[in-house]
Amino acid sequence: MILRFHREVYAGTAIDAALGRFAALASTRFDRSEDGDYFVVEVTAKTEARSRRVALELGNFALGLTIEQGGPDR
Amino acid sequence: MTTAPDAETDTPIETGGYAAFHRFRPIGGPIDGPIGGRVVVTSIEGEWIVLEAAEYSAYAQGRVDPSSALHQRLVDRNLVRAHFDARRAALGYRRRKRFIHSGPNLHIVVVTLRCNETCVYCHASRADLDAVHTDMTIETAERTVDMILRTTSPHVTIEFQGGEPLVNFPVVQHIVAYATERNRGLGKQLEFTMVSNLSLMDETKLQWLLAHRVQLCTSIDGPKALHDKQRKLPTLSAYDAALPWIARINEAYREAGLDPTLYHVEALLTTTRETLERWREVVDTYVALGCRALFLRPVDPFGFAEKTRRIVEYPREDYLAYYRNALDYIIELNLQGVEILERYAAIFLTKILTGDDPNFLDIRSPGGAGIGQLAYNYDGTIYSSDEGRMLGAAGDPTFVIGDVHTGRYRDIVAHPTIRAMAIASNLEGQPDCVDCPYVPYCGTQPEHNHKTLGTMMGRMRESSMCAVHKGIQDILFEKLATADAPTLEILRRWTTIRAREHFLQDTPAP
Amino acid sequence: MSESLLGMPPGRVEADIGEAAVTLTVPGAVYPLPAVYAAAYCFIARCYVLVDRDGEDLRVVLTAKDPAGIHGGAQGLRALVGEFANELLASAWRREITRQNRGLIESVTMQAFGAAMGPPSLDDLEAFDFSDEPFDDPLGIAQSWEDKYRKPKPAGSEPGPEGGEEQGGA
């Protein structure tokens, strides 16, 4: 599953921190890239359903960290 | 120049800024209704007036005749801009907030979770009588007292709760002795209270509690059938188990020469769905028991389980109808010479009529969590309040703020959670409250908001607690506006706070 | 499949009942990003929340973590949207109120905590970190007058004995 995080909403540092926390998940790959105004993360797990679940959890984590640090990176 | 549309022609008229800052709220139903539609107006410092709708219209439009009696009434209450006394307003505001000048005074100590009763609305933190691991140890009790006496408050009330605190009576005794001894070097005004179902009381325990001046409080849910249906003892009637001890304790106070109008067992009520239609019986029960106060508390959301909630809960409009009926009946009894007050009314009326604050921790702004009260669980875990502890027992640790074994007092009271709760319960920053005339008198509870609305801040328009507070104050202001002189005198009398000095521990000043 | 919900403004709220998800378009002119953050944060326990920019607006996607917990399909999603909208409004309004009443709120809160905490004890002071580690000093309170207000040196100049510009010498 591909997640697109807008730079004006999500902090890149928060996304990186979230990826750091999720990196240890077995059999799951995270590919990070950038596309214009977006940070892009592709999540690939054993099944599509698991990819989706992990991606959405990652999205929550990144949003939470962004909010806790006060917003996007300046 | 300030303008407002003319009520009849809708053309702008110059108001000249007649009205000082105020908040307002229509009460009493429609203008052509039985009470004729009135408007409560309050100032920033809590001065108040109830106006007829036409009077309010004139006030808001700046059309009040300066030579009129209405104008003088408004000036007297600091509601006219040209005569606004800022110093008076500041002093009034400061007086209402004076509780913020000292730290936590109420300390709830849960000496055990074990309880011999099972109550339908009870929180999930009770345990069966064989769960001795839920008894507070002596060491934890001493660390708890050490933490309590670090409070900056010159007045300390240690309230024993449970479970049923009589189950762990030795620790109760130890806390009383240890705290009294430790306080000798500190000189705080120290009091002890106990909330007990009284079913495990015996004469030996009672004599000890009386000798050590521990105030006793119990729960009575109404007439026997209702009480026993909601509060179950395995083989006995909970009502029959409590009643003799209420009578015995009251008798003991009389024997000690204490004024029975001031010294008697206080009882608390929890209003469930079953209670709503039985308001008359509830009041009659309390009068028959010799109680001088009745606290018509609604059921709280920290109860056992979802399935139980569906049995005991009810819409708050139903609660307010019950409250109005009960209050009217209580007033009727007072007019016949029976002395009994309703506690909610007394709290709000004290704020409204005296300009003072009785420091009831759940009805103040900011609320009392952490800075006015703390709760200590049997294992030494410290919570923002007893409600926070109940949520903890149900698996939600949001309101854990430390423990007595490793915590530092200043870190406890300044915990980030407590800071957030102080902000969340400051009504000056709360949507809806900022426009509500009851802001000077009201309060919210972050734990309640968290449980029912998902955030500590809450959303007041959806809050059942707000509905109760607002509804009760609507009723009280209706009475203040329309009641006859004898009724007003009764309401005024309910604001009289008489200190019960007998319960202050004898502690010489350091 | 995307569809409208009863009573919800079409074009602003779209639902995917099968996925137990709703998409709200939040007008940026009305709701600042911090208000959206505040409302979104309240929902991350029970929903997956994704927030995106859509020009001046923000698009919020709420996906129920437990679809079975959304009672009644469309009705349940409608309630979810309604609750989010209420929280969003409360957050936006609270932000404005706080801005207007900041002084009053801060003074009461500081007084309450100052009184509750009381002065530090010797044990508290002993535990306090007085190390020389640098700390944030946005107002320059810890700076000396000279450090704060002395004139900047011209580029390439060497500091003289007094730390100022080099004086011409014989």
Image (spheres, coloured by chain):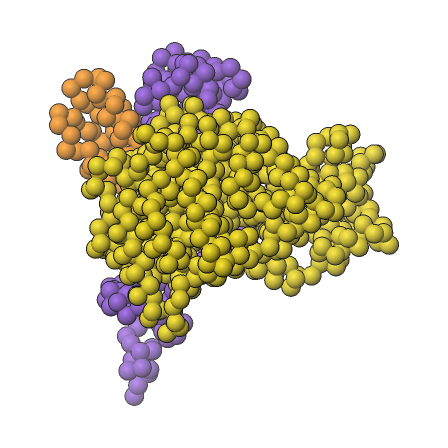
Chain colours: A orange, B yellow, C purple
Q: Quadrant of the C terminus of chain C?
A: bottom left
Above or below, B321 against B349 in this view is: above
Please tell me which residue lies in front, B3 or B349.
B349
| Picture mark count | 0
Would residue B226 appear left or right of A35 to someone viewing this image?
right
Query: For residue C163, which quarter of the picture?
Result: bottom left
Could you tell me which residue is drawn at 40 percent across and 66 percent down? B506
- Whether residue B335 is situated above or below residue B37 in the rendered picture: below
Tell whether B289 sits left or right of A4. Answer: right
Q: x and y percent of residue C114 in the render? A: 42, 62
Q: Residue at the location (28% across, 82% down)?
A: C161
Residue extending furthest bottom? C170
**In the figure, residue B434 lies in which quadrant?**
top right
Asked if residue B81 can be seen in this view, the reply is no
Q: Nearer the viewer, residue C58 or B456?
A: B456
For residue B490, say whether it is visible. Answer: yes
- Out of A53 and B328, give the one closest to the viewer: B328
Q: Which quadrant does the N terminus of chain C fall into?
A: top left
Q: Nearer the viewer, residue A1 or C113?
A: C113
Expressed as whole percent of the image width and height from the top left, the position of residue B318 reads: 56, 27
Where B108 sits versus B393, above or below?
Answer: below
Left or right: B494, with B72 as reference point = left
Which residue: 63% across, 55% down? B354
- The picture places residue B143, in percent across and down from the top left corner, at 25, 57
